[in-house]
Image (cartoon, rainbow, N blue to C red):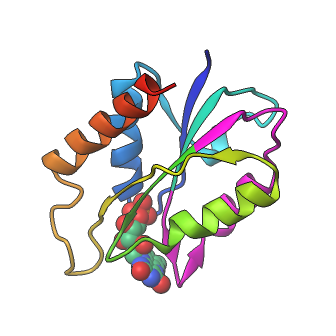
Amino acid sequence: MTTAVIYHSVTGNTRKVAEAIAKSLSCAAQPVKEYPLDSEADVMFIGGAVYGGRLDAVMDSFLKALSPQKVKRAVLFSTSVKESKAIGLMRDILVRQGIAVDNETFVCKGKFLFFNLKHPNKTDLEQAEAFAQNVMRKR
Ligand SMILES: Cc1cc2nc3c(=O)[nH]c(=O)nc-3n(C[C@H](O)[C@H](O)[C@H](O)COP(=O)(O)O)c2cc1C
C-alpha cells in the first residue's frame, strides 16, 4: 500500500505536523510543489492552513489537479490559530474531485504573530503521530 504525506506550509507549522506524521509512517513528507502529480497513493495525508481566510493558491491548484484514479483516499490535517477553516475548504475541493475523504482529521494550534507561541509543540506532534497510526490501523 502506498502512503503519501503532502503539505503546504507558509510559516512552517503544518510542515512540522507533516514531518511528524511522515516519521510515524516511515515515509517522507513532501511539499505540494514537489509531489509528482502522476504518482498514485492509496492513502494521501494532506495538510494545509488558511491565509487571508482561504487556502493558498498553491494548495488550491494542487487539490484541483488530483483525481480518484490517483488518490484512493485522503486524510486531512491542519494547523490554525483557532478552528481550522482549512479542513472544510480542502474537503470541499476533494469531494468535488470525486476523492474519498476520511471523516477523521487532525488539527492543532499553530503559532501566528503573538498567538499560540511554541505551537505546534511536542505534545501536538505526538498527537499527530498517534492520529496517523490510528488512521492506518483502522484500514
Ligand atoms: C499571511 C498569513 C495570513 C493568515 N490568515 C489567516 C486567516 O485569515 N485566518 C486564520 O484563522 N488564520 C490565518 N493565519 C494563521 C495561519 O492559518 C496559521 O498560523 C497556520 O498555522 C499557518 O500554517 P503554516 O505555518 O503551515 O503556514 C494566517 C497566517 C499567515 C502567515
Position of residue 100 in the picture relative to residue 114 (left or right): right
Q: Is residue 116 above or below residue 93?
A: below
The outermost residue toward the bottom is 52
Out of 22 and 133, give the one closest to the viewer. 133
Residue 128 sits inside the magenta stretch: no
State which quarter of the image contains the N terminus.
Answer: top right
Tell me the quadrant of ligand 1. bottom left
Out of 130 and 111, give the one closest to the viewer. 130
Count of marks, rendered view = 0
Where residue 128 sits in the image (x, y, percent)? Answer: 31, 43
Where residue 125 sits in the image (x, y, percent)? Answer: 24, 44
Q: Quadrant of residue 120?
A: bottom left
Q: Is residue 31 above or below residue 59?
A: above
Residue 64 sits inside the magenta stretch: yes
Give the residue at x 41% y 30%.
22
Out of 62 and 34, give the one closest to the viewer. 62
From which residue to which does the magenta span run? Answer: 48-74
Q: Quadrant of residue 35?
A: top right
Give the residue at x 35% y 27%.
23
Give the residue at x 63% y 60%.
91
Where residue 29 sits in the image (x, y, percent)? Answer: 48, 34
Give the residue at x 51% y 77%.
51
